[in-house]
Image (cartoon, rainbow, N blue to C red):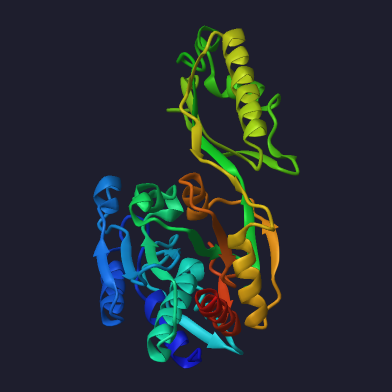
């Protein structure tokens, strides 16, 4: 049923469309056209307007009165550089020419969803009601899924296509994540004439950083300072410094405990030095954990077996739209697309993986 050449052609067409976060307009227009040609009820919501982007979530509905409602979703935006993607096919692998990312994250997922819809139409397959959502702004905080009014669609199960790894891998656990800035405000002074009259914010930060937990805290929890910025000139005692901080954990309790411990340490060190602390770190999205016996997981396991693909459940260290849909009460899993080395210039995807993923999706809707 899967037409490999068509699937690959569609994928290649899409990766050539530049779609950085909040600038998905060209990709959205392409998908609106495709979904309309397939006969779906199509609309675009106001997620772009709400989040300062030029394109909302693209939504398509394939009706099936009285049937279960299945959500299939993948995100339109990619990381940069993506201004001009030149895909190359070598030995069954699709990659970029090395000057950009490929965009398999997440256009591989989109391609599989479109192929599934085409197979349904061509073969007149019986199917559940299908709600397709191609989301905006996923890479910069899951913006599209947060803005999507999923409650109004009565979705029973969600299948989100946005994980690395081989098709058949089912992400059933993913962490909560907290992000934001920790700002230490010291006191400027002339570094050569009167350094003792100043409070060096970087010195304060350094003392605190030696006391907090960074890196892998335990098997479920991580902590990281990714960006440090501050200072005015070499002859001025640094008056302030900003630390871009994030923490993740599969346990909400562990995450909150880590955040409390981290901020208490920063506060004490600031007090000791006479500096001030500003903190806007907050939980960006909640984690989720599904049991292997839950119906949405069993559906994918059975579909994978019918498609001749080995399945396994796994946990992830990253977040996705799946986190948001689970938090809104829709049991959802994140399915591996086959994308490899994502967010790098070495990103690639195997054609076989695109085909296998499409087969799994068709078996999901066949039930």
Left or right: where 59 falls relative to 112: left
Which residue is drawn at the image coordinates 45% and 60% (left, top)?
79
- Estimate the x, y position of residue 302 in percent, counting from the top left: 65, 73
**Can you see residue 251?**
yes
**Foreground residue, 38 or 68?**
68
Vertical order, 12 against 341 (above or below): below
- Quarter that holds the C terminus: bottom right
Q: Nearer the viewer, residue 193 or 255?
A: 255
Q: Quadrant of residue 92?
A: bottom right
Residue 227 in view here: no
Q: How many marks?
A: 0
Residue at 51% from the left image edge and 35% from the top image edge: 283
Give the camera-side residue of 39 and 286.
Answer: 39
Between residue 182 and residue 300, name the one nearer to us.
300
Looking at the rendering, which quadrant does residue 74 occupy? bottom left
Q: Position of residue 165 (x, y in %)?
A: 64, 68
82 w.r.t. 91: above or below: above
Tell me if 9 is positioned left or right of 217 in this view: left
**x and y, in percent, of residue 298 in the image:** 64, 65
Left/right placement of residue 310 relative to residue 129 reads right
Image height check: is 46 above or below 207?
below
Which residue is at a point 31% across and 73% down the rendered structure image? 31
**Relative to 15, 348 lies left or right:** right
Expressed as whole percent of the image width and height from the top left, the position of residue 2 reads: 50, 89
């Amino acid at each position: 049923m899967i037409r490999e050449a068509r699937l690959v052609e569609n994928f290649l067409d899409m990766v050539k469309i530049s779609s950085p976060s909040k600038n998905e307009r060209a990709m959205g227009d392409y998908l609106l056209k495709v979904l309309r040609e397939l006969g779906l009820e199509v609309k675009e919501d106001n997620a772009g307007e709400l989040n300062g982007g030029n394109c909302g979530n693209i939504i398509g509905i394939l009706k099936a009165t009285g049937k279960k409602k299945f959500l299939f979703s993948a995100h339109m935006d990619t990381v940069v550089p993506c201004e001009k993607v030149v895909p190359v096919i070598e030995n069954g692998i699709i990659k970029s020419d090395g000057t950009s990312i490929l965009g398999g994250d997440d256009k591989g997922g989109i391609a599989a969803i479109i192929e599934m819809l085409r197979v349904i139409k061509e073969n007149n397959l019986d199917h559940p009601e299908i709600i397709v959502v191609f989301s905006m702004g996923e890479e910069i905080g899951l913006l599209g899924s947060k803005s999507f009014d999923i409650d109004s669609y009565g979705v029973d199960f969600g299948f989100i296509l946005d994980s690395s790894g081989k098709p058949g891998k089912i992400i059933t656990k993913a962490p909560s994540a907290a992000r934001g800035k920790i700002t230490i405000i010291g006191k400027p002074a002339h570094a050569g004439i009167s350094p003792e009259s100043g409070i060096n914010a970087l010195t304060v930060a350094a003392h605190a950083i030696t006391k907090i937990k960074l890196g892998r805290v335990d098997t479920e929890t991580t902590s990281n300072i990714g960006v440090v910025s501050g200072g005015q000139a070499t002859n001025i005692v640094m008056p302030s410094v900003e630390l871009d901080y994030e923490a993740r954990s599969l346990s909400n309790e562990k995450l909150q405990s880590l955040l409390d411990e981290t901020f208490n340490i920063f506060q004490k060190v600031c007090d000791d030095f006479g500096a001030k602390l500003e903190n806007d770190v907050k939980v960006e999205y909640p984690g989720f954990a599904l049991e292997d016996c839950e119906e949405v997981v069993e559906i994918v396991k059975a579909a994978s077996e019918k498609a001749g693909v080995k399945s396994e459940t796994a946990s992830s260290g990253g977040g996705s739209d799946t986190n948001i849909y689970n938090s809104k009460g829709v049991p959802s899993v994140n399915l591996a697309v086959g994308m490899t080395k994502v967010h790098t210039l070495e990103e690639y995807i195997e054609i076989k993986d695109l085909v296998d993923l499409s087969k799994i999706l068709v078996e999901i809707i066949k039930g």
